[in-house]
Amino acid sequence: MRRICLGVTLILGLALSVQASSLPVLELEPGTNQISILVVNQRKTALDSVDVAVNSDLPGWLKITGTTPVDVPAGAEQKLSLDLQVGEVTPGTSGELPLVLKNRTGHSWQVKALVKVVPPSRYELLPNFPN
């Protein structure tokens, strides 16, 4: 499983800014990838149950298989985990990952990232049983 961290900042609960001037590029391997979104709460109040959802259609080869909501106290930061499954696709294929972060009170923030499929970093030869 490949682990990647995408940094984002929540500012006053009204805006979401990615820490780079352009869209970040996430390099994903075929199979399961775990993305960590670093949520920094600069508000004076806590953000309860921040979760992530898809804003629009994902590429057909990409699927969200799990998320773990987090509570982010005022002035603190937490990592929000997101599991992505990359299906059968040629390395070098890319697409957009449009996400929405939402909290329990209904506030939402949009963030986008580009995803690029890279060859696996390791290969594994399993036993031939059963054949």
Image (tube, rainbow, N blue to C red):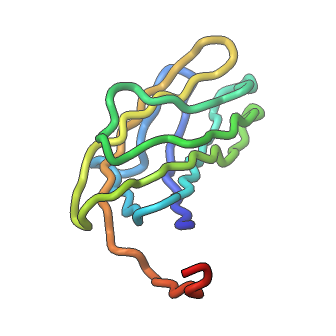
Q: Nearer the viewer, residue 60 or 70?
A: 60
Which residue lies most toward the top here? Answer: 106
Q: Nearer the viewer, residue 87 or 35?
A: 87
Q: Nearer the viewer, residue 123 or 67?
A: 123
Q: Give residue 47's position: percent from left, percent from top.
A: 70, 26
Residue at the location (36% across, 41% down)? 97
Position of 19 relative to 71 (above/below):
below
Quarter of the image that includes the N terminus? bottom right
Which residue lies most toward the front here? Answer: 131
Q: Tell me which corner region of the image, top left, top right, bottom left or bottom right, holds residue 72.
A: top right
Position of 29 relative to 115 (above/below):
below
Residue at the location (43% across, 33% down)? 99
Residue at the location (69% across, 45% down)? 78
- 35 vs 76, left or right, is left
- 113 vs 121, left or right, is left
Q: Tell me which corner region of the image, top left, top right, bottom left or bottom right, holds residue 3.
A: bottom right
Residue at the location (57% across, 45% down)? 82
Q: Give residue 35's position: percent from left, percent from top.
A: 54, 53
Q: Give residue 9's position: percent from left, percent from top.
A: 53, 40
Quarter of the image that includes the C terminus? bottom right
Q: Tell me which corner region of the image, top left, top right, bottom left or bottom right, holds residue 94.
A: bottom left
Q: Give residue 108's position: percent from left, percent from top.
A: 52, 20
Callout count: 0
